[in-house]
């Protein structure tokens, strides 16, 4: 009703001088989106992939420097084989279209996570997609595949142990800065905002290290329904937060 209309994103605007530098997105709710429509879960994942593309393009357009999208977690292997196969096939199909999806666009593709568990076929397709986008200068898109925050920290700890054993560093060199430089996201700006749609309010092993002082935004919308307007709203809400980092 007009007289009772709430102030919303149509009236509020993003402040281009206070953008989150790096946004993490937990792309959740594909299955529930499909269930509501009496469709197979695979249809939800497919719809989710379209949303992913749309949102990345929007983030690049408004000037976000980096986005990390959680596409497959280290725990997602525990799903039924049919679902895992379906997700891997969808990923492969997506990467095969890399030329048309990424060439000439401003997106720099990276993959974070343990790629050793992915098939050779998928790894080749990833390498190809990364190569195509190498010369680009716009948004960095980290696709988190077989990614787990704990796994990432274990990996950094192993690098530290090896460096110490080889005499490259001393124990006191292993500090926050060192570990930060050995996270997958080392070259990216700090994660300022983590978004989780689908109504869940947990990190599910996403960017554990990086989340220490990230702002968290959640919504009940299932990922396939997530729109540019929702991303705009998340950023507007982020810009109203008071980030204190322990200070007063
Ligand atoms: C997210 O959607 C996609 C992946 C985890 C790969 P889900 O498949 O988790 O969807 P819900 O949570 O069952 O609705
Ligand atoms: C998180 O979603 C992983 C991805 C979106 C890739 P999940 O659906 O796996 O998380 P849980 O199981 O609900 O915590
Ligand atoms: Mg889920």
Image (tube, rainbow, N blue to C red):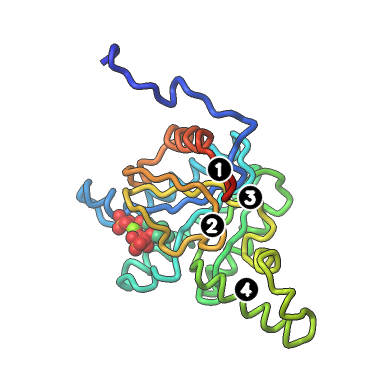
User: What residue occupies the far bottom of the structure in this picture?
Assistant: 165
Q: Which residue is mark 1?
A: 243
User: What residue occupies the far right of the structure in this picture?
Assistant: 168
Q: Which residue is mark 2?
A: 212
Q: Earlier in the sequence, mark 4 or mark 1?
A: 4
Q: Earlier in the sequence, mark 3 or mark 4?
A: 3
Is the C-beta separation of discs 2 and 1 under 8 Å?
A: no
Q: Quadrant of ligand 2?
A: bottom left
Quadrant, the N terminus: top left
Distance from the alpha carbon under mark 1 to that under mark 3? 24 Å
| In front: label 3 or label 2 | 2
For label 2, the crowd category at 10 Å Cα-Cα, with few meaning under 14, some 14 to 19 and many 20 or more, is: few
Q: Which residue is mark 3?
A: 140
181 left or right of 191? Answer: right
Q: Residue at x 20, y 50 (%)?
A: 38
Q: Residue at x 57, y 69 (%)?
A: 123
Distance from the alpha carbon under mark 3 to that under mark 4? 22 Å
- Element class at badge 3: strand
Which disc number belongs to residue 156? 4
| In front: label 3 or label 4 | 4
Quadrant, the C terminus: top right
Residue 233 appears in the picture as rendered = yes
Q: Between residue 53 and residue 173, name the one nearer to us.
A: 173
For label 1, the crowd category at 10 Å Cα-Cα, with few meaning under 14, some 14 to 19 and many 20 or more, is: some
């Amino acid at each position: 009703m007009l007289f009772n209309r709430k102030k919303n994103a149509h009236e509020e605007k993003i402040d281009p001088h206070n953008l989150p530098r790096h946004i993490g997105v937990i792309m959740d709710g594909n299955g529930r989106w499909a269930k509501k429509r009496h469709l197979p879960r695979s249809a939800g994942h497919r719809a989710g992939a379209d949303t992913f593309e749309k949102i990345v393009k929007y983030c690049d357009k408004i000037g976000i420097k980096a986005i990390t999208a959680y596409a497959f977690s280290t725990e997602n292997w525990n799903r039924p084989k049919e679902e895992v196969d379906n997700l891997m096939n969808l990923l492969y199909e997506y990467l095969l279209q890399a030329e048309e999806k990424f060439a000439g666009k401003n997106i720099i593709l990276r993959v974070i996570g343990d790629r050793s568990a992915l098939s050779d076929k998928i790894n080749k397709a990833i390498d190809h997609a990364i190569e195509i986008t190498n010369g680009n200068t716009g948004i960095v898109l980290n696709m988190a595949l077989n990614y787990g925050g704990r796994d990432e920290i274990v990996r950094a700890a192993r690098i530290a142990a090896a460096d110490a054993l080889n005499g490259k560093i001393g124990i006191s060199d292993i500090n926050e800065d060192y570990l930060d430089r050995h996270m997958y996201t080392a070259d990216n700006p700090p994660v300022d905002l983590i978004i989780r749609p689908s109504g869940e309010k947990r990190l599910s092993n996403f960017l554990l290290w990086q989340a220490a002082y990230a702002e968290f935004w959640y919504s009940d919308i299932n990922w396939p329904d997530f729109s540019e307007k929702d991303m705009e709203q998340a950023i507007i809400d982020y810009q109203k937060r008071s980030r204190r980092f322990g200070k007063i």
